[in-house]
Every structure is written in structure tokens, then in C-alpha cells.
Image: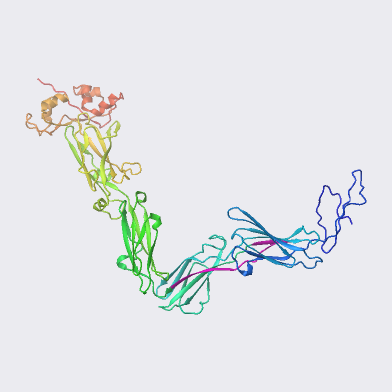
Amino acid sequence: SVIMSGINGSNTSITSLQQNTTYVLKLYPKSVAGDFHAPTGPSTAEFVLTAAAQDVTVRCPSGVCTGTSLQVAWTRPTGVMIQPKAYRVASSQVTLNGTAVQSQLDVTDTVTSVVLGDLEKGRPVTIRVLANNRVFPTFYALSASANVIPVSPPSSPADLKLRMVGTTLVQIDWMPPMDSGDGTTNGLTIVSYLLDYKASGAVSYEPAVEVFGQSFTVQGLQSGTNYTFRVRAQTAPVIGTICQARCAPVPPLSLVGEASERSLVFGRVPIWDELQAPPIVDPPTLYNLFVGNLFSFQVRALSLEAGQVVTISATGLSDCGAELVPNVVGNPSLSTLLFLPSVQQMDKTFWICFLATDSYGAFSDQRCIRLFVASPRPAFTRPDQALGDPDAPTLEAVAGCELSIRLEAHDLTSGKDVTAQEAASRGYLVRIQSDTSIALSQYGEAASPSLPAGAVLAESDVEFANPSSRMFHWTPARGQESFTYLVCFRLLDSLATYNSASAQSNAKFCTRVRVARCKYCMKAGDSLYSIAQDWGTEWLNLWAGNDLLTKPGQTDEKTEVRLGPLLSVSHQDSLVSLATKFSVSVQDILAWNPDLHAQVEQEIDLILFDGQEICVLPGTCIN
């Protein structure tokens, strides 16, 4: 019968053949001149279709899953006249390093299972089962293809710990296994854990309890009895699928992993020496630590059970770089915590928690401390303006008289309840330095990166101290009167980490000093006559305007002299009108009022304000 026609090319596929039927295929060429076929052509030998293997399964060999081998099984085809001549099982896997590993096993028609070995756990593997045609021995037909992942039972749970809770319970805690069954920590899901235990001398373990967490409490134990506890992880992975006419999942496995074991004598756990251990307080005790100062803290623990070796451990060490040094390991055990704080750790709090464990793995209650690394916090303490009070009084100075201000500062650090003396003993010192000054007037301000002209900040005996003090001295000169000066200072710490005048701190201290207008402080060699000559007035005016000068020829050095009255003007006044009114020159008024002179020097139109005070020494008629 004709099963295909109109074939173009040199090959084709035939899909309508049936099992249990013998076929001979003949090929009849067609003429290009019309619908004519050759009366004969090449033909094949008799053949039947290749029978496929059935019921292909993939499982762990003998029920033991190692992750490196798999058993592939099948059944011989039924209802066919001719069985396959042989079977071939081929596998292909790409390892973790990218290497493609392929293998094949050829078996006779009587063999119905093989074991594939040398597989890499956790890496997908493709498995194909092929049947060999008896008529054409070089031809293999695909029976089934499986895509699976070889796995093993999980490893033992990590970090198994036993802890007494009161005198009647034992709490068991653990972490997930490092290998979930595919070579990774969390590749397969841990569905549950099996926990069982037995007393010393018992033949078998108590029935296992299935736990769906990572902690369990056992009760009903007898004090003084040695118990062994076991915990095993359990998975139920679906490792892949098998495709024949359709894909079906490989039945899930139930894999129970290796056991973690710990023992303890119930009722006896390590205890702390309360004289050498952190107290039980919440929150834990806070200790101030200082940069460059080695902090040490000793802890001591012991066991009431003879023959035990107590080990002290601590958490939080890696967070700060601290070290726990075991001084004595035994019973009792003594360890010392050592920590040398750095500048980078300032203002950070570190928790260190200690645990004592005995030879059975039983452990004590946890004791913790908090370590705070203090940073420098220099602050002014004197004068009062250093406290940043915007309402602090303005100091008054007189040209020719020395103004002295004692500046004091300390550093109590950012630690809790730290005194200046303690901070100093730890190397936290402070230095007072000048910063800037600003000359203020009715017409604006002029900033300077240094102290006002003539001012000095006296050196102290030591560069850094805590507390620290320095004296500010200033004798204002003529030309500085009528201005209010904002004189600013800053603090530096000996660790070179803090500058109070920095943009981050913004805590520099500034004091206001007003240099009085129309006043002068006499110096050695001055007389009322010489002062009157310098200021363009008459000595009689000076004598008459200063009640304390009873004898004009006898004046003491540093005596304040009022040069003339302070005149309150209005915006309608001008320098010309005032000069005319008081019989003086405009240049005289400018000389007596440096703030006005500064405006005129800048070629800025001078405006007088209502209530503004200016110094005027009125002209006097002298016979």
C-alpha cells in the first residue's frame, strides 16, 4: 500500500507504522515529465518497529542516597513480537566548574536496571533509556528521558546546644545543617527534625519527636543522670521528572540525615563566679572605653561536676576586634577580655556576651556587658558666654586700658559620668585657640581671621590639658572705639578628632566686647593737656567733664577719662549740621567716631539714624 507520496529530497520520516507488523519499504522514483512512477525501485529488508522499555524509574541504589549515584530501572516491553536486542542508558551532567561529563552503559536485553556512578551531588543530570532494534543493530530508539538532581540525606544539624532551664527542663537548640542534601545550606527544604534521647545505660533511645523548629524542651528527666540527645534533619525532595508519552514527577524521597549528639548530666551546668562575672542586669552594664587605652575584663566559671573541663567563649568579638584570652582552662576556668579601641570606633557601643560550656556541651546562662568607646567633647566652662547664651552681657573696654578674660574649658567626653580628671588620665586633653574676630557697627561688619589688633591669647604652661585655661589680653588702641567686637575661640582635642569651630561641630565660643566711644584710658606720661591736644579739645573741658579728677596735674595711669558727651542724633542730622552746631569740623567728628570714618573712607553715603550716639567734643571759647 502507498503510505507516503510526493516526497521531495533524499530522506523523510514515517509516523504511521504499527507495532507487531513486519514492514518492507520500497521507493518508486517519479518522472519529471508527468505523473509517471518507475515500475520498480530499491527496497529494505523486512523489519519491525523497536519496542520501547516500559515503567522507567530513577531512585537511590538499594534505597541509599549518596548524591553521587542513581539507579535507573525499567521493565521489558509487553505485547510485542520481537524484544529489543539490547538497552543503552546514557547520562549527561555539567559539573559546578562547567565541565560536561557524559557516559553510557550498554546492557543485554535481559538486564533491566543499571547504577550510574561518579555523579556530582546537587547538579542536574539528564538520563536517557534507549532500546536497540534487532533488525538494525546500529539503531537505538529513545524509550524515556529523565531530568533529575542527585541528592543525599542532609548533614548533621549544626551548633547543637543543651541548656538547663531551672531544675526540671533541658532546652535543646540547634542550627540547620551545613549541607541540606544538595551540597548547599538551603538548596533543599528541611521539612522537620527528629529528636530523641536516652539515659546512660539504656538499651535504646526514647521514641523520636518530630520538631518543626530549631528548639525543643525536654522535661521529666532525673537529676544526676547522664543523658545523650540526638537531632537529625529530615527532607522530602522531589528530585526531577521522567518523560515518556508525558512527564511524571519522580516520587519524593524521605531522607533522614546524620545525627548531632550532645550529652549532659541533668541538673548540673557550669556556673559563674559572681565576683568575676558580669552581673545579671537589663540592659547589661555599660563600660566607658577610651581610644588607645587597653580595656581588660576577667570572667571565671566552674562546674560542680568532677572531671569536667569548662570552656569560656564570647560573642561580639569580631564586631570590634576584641580578643578573649584563656588564662586557665579547666575547672574552674578563667579568661580575660582584651580590647584596644581605635579612633574609628568612637561613639560606638559593642555587646560582648560570655558563655561557659562543660565537657558535655551543657552551658551556663549568658552574661553580657556593653562597651562604649568615648569620643572627645571639649566645651568651654568660663566665661558664662561660653555656654552659648545669646543674652550674655556685652563686655566693655576702653581705648588704652587692658581687658583680660580668663578662658576655661574641659573635656568630659561622650561617655557616661566621666570627669575631666578621669578623661585626662586616659589621654583626652583639650587646647584653647583663637579663631576669628568680627568688628560690628551700625553700618555692617568686617571679619578678620585673627584676633583684633593688639589682642593676644597668652600661652599656657602646657599645650594640652584637661581642664585647660588661657588668658585673653587686649588693650584697644585709638581707632577701635565705637566698634563692638565679636572675638571667637575654638577648642581642639589631643586626639586631633574634634574642632569646635568646624562646620560639623559649630560650637565655637564668641564673646562680645564693645570699645567705649568718647573714652580714653591714661597711660604713663599722659596729662590732661597732652590728651586734649591729641583729641582736639581743651584740657579744661576734660577736667570739668570728669568729677574724679580733682587735681588736673595729678592723674594716675589707667585712669578712665571721659572725652566728651555722647550726642543722640536723628536721621535729619548731618555731619555738616552737627559740625556747625558745635563749632567743630567734620574731620574732628570723623576722628572721634571711627565707625563713621570707616564709612566715609569707603565712599559710602553716610546716613545717621534716629537715636544713634556719636561722640562730639564741642568747641570752647578761651580768652
Q: Residue at x 40, y 56 (%)?
A: 318
SS majority, magenta: strand
Tell me: residue 35, above or below residue 551: below
Residue 185: percent from the left, percent from the top? 53, 60
Residue 511: percent from the left, percent from the top? 25, 40
Q: State the extent of the magenta-drawn residues as a range.
A: 240-263
The quarter of the displayed image where residue 267 is located? bottom left
Magenta run includes residue 107: no
Q: What residue occupies the far top of the structure in this picture? A: 623
Tell me: residue 24, above or below residue 485: below
| Quadrant where the image shows the N terminus | bottom right
Depth check, front residue: 51 or 422: 51
Residue 471: percent from the left, percent from the top? 20, 41
- Taking the image as shown, residue 190 lies to the left or right of residue 423, namely right
Q: Residue at x 80, y 66 (%)?
A: 80
Tell me: residue 395, above or below residue 86: above
The quarter of the displayed image where residue 127 is located? bottom right
Magenta run includes residue 243: yes
